[in-house]
Image (cartoon, rainbow, N blue to C red):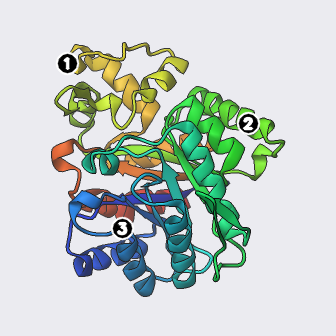
């Protein structure tokens, strides 16, 4: 089984410089780049993806993640169509209930019911069907054939089941441990069963936290805060704690990160992602491929609220020099 590796790129540089950085990701051997859809940074995710599409040839390009609160389903369908025209066969969109962008706009996250309606509407529009919004029938005058996939970003069991039921797959934050992956897949399959769908047809992308460097230093991440009142392990969702329990690590939702022991932090890091030297990161990915049959990961560089928009220079260089060649070898 081959292992495809994508990476998160924040909108932390002016778009011309960001485009150069993304071109460097392609040269480093990544299979895809996902750009966060955060409006409050002052730059637009889809404009950045369009610029990247014009200067790359192999990278998969997608937002991670758009929400259906600040972006209407009709708008998302049009954006998906436009991106597909620029990068045919290598683009898709991911949607979720919203976090920082929704919070920054003073709105509330989408409910499961709202998200279900939105995902179904986007997929129907992209398939050429007519969809009603507040009694107004709408059909895209231009649509891509075949339609691009619409994936649901899911961190908890209910969202995974919804992904299995209505989306083309899931971008999931559930860890790399085989027990955690198996539990997550069971929820994805349960949702697919409700809609009489074959779970084998669903795409899977595993969000994989990564922090490259000295292992003793990198394993401190679970012992930190993402921002005041929110432990790092509870970002972007406390569902991470649910998956850790599947592997025998039980932490309370309102835990104090500093109370996590060094040994426990070591275990958590190994369960969740890649924390240590580049050589270790490569071996951990190979283990996930063999033990959990993980075929595609989305590297999510570890950060706090204060460092959210720093570019992953170190991770890209580590992948270029060590991780990518080791995976191929």
Q: Secondary structure at mark 3?
A: helix
Image coordinates of residue 141 in percent, x first then y, are 64, 82
Report how far apart the C-alphas of labels 2 and 1 lie in the structure: 36 Å
Q: Which is nearer the eye, 287 or 136?
A: 136
User: Residue drawn at (23%, 16%), measured in percent from left and top?
Assistant: 256
71 above or below 113? below
Residue 193's x, y, as percent? Answer: 80, 36
Furthest residue toward front:
135
Residue marked by disc 3: 45
Foreground mark, 2 or 1, reads 2
Q: Residue at x 75, y 40 (%)?
A: 192
Q: Reply above or below: 327 against 271.
A: below
Q: Is residue 39 left or right of residue 68?
A: left
List the residue tagged with mark 2.
189
The residue located at (52%, 32%) in the rendering is 156
Q: Which label's residue is closer to the chain start, 2 or 1?
A: 2
The crowd level at tag 1 (other Cα within 10 Å; few <14, some 14-19, many 20+) is few
Q: Which residue is mark 1?
A: 258
How would you rate the neighbour count of disc 2 (Cα within 10 Å): few for under 14, some for 14-19, many for 20 or more? Answer: many
């Amino acid at each position: 089984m081959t292992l495809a590796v994508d990476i998160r790129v924040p909108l932390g540089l002016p778009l011309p410089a960001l485009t150069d950085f993304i071109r460097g990701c392609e040269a480093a051997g990544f299979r895809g780049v996902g750009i966060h859809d955060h409006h409050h940074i002052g730059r637009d995710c889809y404009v950045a993806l369009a610029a990247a599409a014009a200067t790359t040839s192999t990278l998969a390009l997608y937002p991670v993640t758009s929400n259906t609160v600040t972006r209407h389903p009709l708008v998302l369908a049009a954006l998906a169509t436009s991106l597909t025209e620029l990068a045919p066969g290598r683009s898709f969109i991911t949607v979720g209930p919203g976090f920082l962008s929704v919070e920054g706009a003073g709105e509330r996250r989408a409910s499961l019911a709202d998200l279900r309606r939105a995902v179904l509407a986007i997929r129907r529009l992209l398939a050429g069907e007519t969809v009603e919004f507040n009694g107004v029938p709408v059909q895209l005058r231009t649509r891509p054939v075949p339609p691009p996939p619409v994936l649901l970003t899911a961190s908890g069991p209910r969202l995974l089941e919804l992904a299995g039921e209505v989306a083309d797959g899931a971008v999931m934050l559930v860890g790399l441990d085989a027990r955690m992956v198996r539990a997550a897949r069971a929820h994805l399959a349960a949702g697919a069963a409700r809609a009489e769908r074959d779970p084998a047809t669903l795409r899977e992308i595993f969000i994989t936290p990564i922090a490259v460097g000295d292992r003793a230093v990198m394993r401190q991440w679970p012992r930190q805060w993402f921002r005041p009142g929110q432990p790092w392990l509870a970002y972007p969702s406390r569902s991470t704690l649910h998956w850790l329990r599947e592997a025998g690590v039980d932490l309370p939702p309102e835990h104090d990160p500093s109370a996590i022991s060094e040994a426990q932090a070591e275990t958590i890091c190994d369960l969740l992602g890649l924390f240590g030297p580049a050589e270790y990161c490569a071996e951990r990915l190979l283990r996930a491929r063999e033990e959990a049959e993980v075929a595609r990961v989305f590297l999510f560089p570890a950060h706090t609220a204060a460092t959210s928009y720093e570019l992953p220079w170190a991770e890209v260089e580590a992948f270029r020099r060590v991780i990518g060649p080791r995976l191929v070898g």
